[in-house]
Amino acid sequence: MQRLVLLLSVAIAASAQGPAVAPAAPTTPTAPAAPAPAAGTTNITGVLAKAGQFNTFIRLLKSTGVAAQIDNQLNNSFGSGMTVFAPTDNAFTSLASGTLNSLSDSQKNALIQYHVLSTAIPMSQFDTVSNPLRTQAGSTSPAQYPLNVTAEGQQVNITTGVVNATVDNTLYTGDQLVVYQVNKVLLPMAIAGTAAPAPAPLAPTKTKGKTPTSTVADAPEAEASTDTSLAAPARVVTLTGGGVVAVVHVLALACVWWGP
């Protein structure tokens, strides 16, 4: 009887406490979260689009593949940065009619590469650079892709051998990229250089006019005959004086006349 009462007491107490709770599963430590990507990766066409008035240059950057090349070099390498000289839409409009259309695809690519340096050059360092600068177009030989940059105070001048341009504004400055606005399209010698001019033709020789003949021509002076031969029947002596010709016939002394 006492055991039954004890069992009932235990049962009543267990029911009052509610259902048993299973032990919590051990927690697994979580890996640290990956760092968030850097905000706003550099994009050359984005920089130019934000600045405005560079639609033609943006179109050429994309069509030649140079835009993707620049972005890859900036974001996937640890080089010395890049400098881009960006001509405005007005600069392209100022080109001779048909200039761009006359270029092949490889020439268009070289033209855009010619506006890109493989190093970032702040404005304050242009007065210390060594000319000619090497662009991504290639050789700096005089007939190829030389680029000379000089600074005079706050003005930066660019010479290609074909055109002279100036830097009008700084569009973007960063650790790896500097973008400048230029007032002309930088035409390299290899694409737009003109051949040496041909020698100038010789001036035609002037034909001297004939001296008009006078109405009364002076007779040429004749040399007096020195023939003393006795065989000649006569000696002719020509005398010239005052334009009147006098001819004196002197009969030769012959034996037939004077006799021995």
Image (cartoon, rainbow, N blue to C red):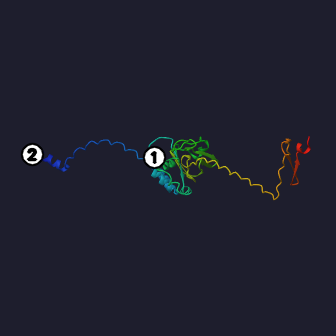
Residue 93 as seen in the image, left or right of residue 218: left
Image quadrant occupied by the C terminus: top right
Q: Position of residue 116 (x, y in %)?
A: 52, 46
The residue where tag 2 is placed is: 4
Image location of residue 40, percent across then percent down? 45, 50
Label 1's element?
helix
Secondary structure type for disc 2: helix
Residue that badge 1 annotates: 69
Would you identify the image quadrant in which residue 128 lies?
A: top right
Task: Name the quarter where the N terminus is drawn.
Answer: top left
Residue under the point 47% across and 54% down: 59
The image quadrant of residue 94 is: bottom right
State the separation of the CA atoms marked 1 and 2.
Answer: 90 Å
Instruction: Tell me if residue 11 can be seen.
Output: yes
- Which dot marks residue 223? none
Q: Can you give x and y, in whole percent of width and height, for residue 65 in the image?
A: 45, 49
Which label lies toward us, 1 or 2?
1
Contact between marks 1 and 2 (CB within 8 A): the answer is: no
Name the amino acid type tagged 1. Gln
Q: Is residue 192 left or right of residue 66?
A: right
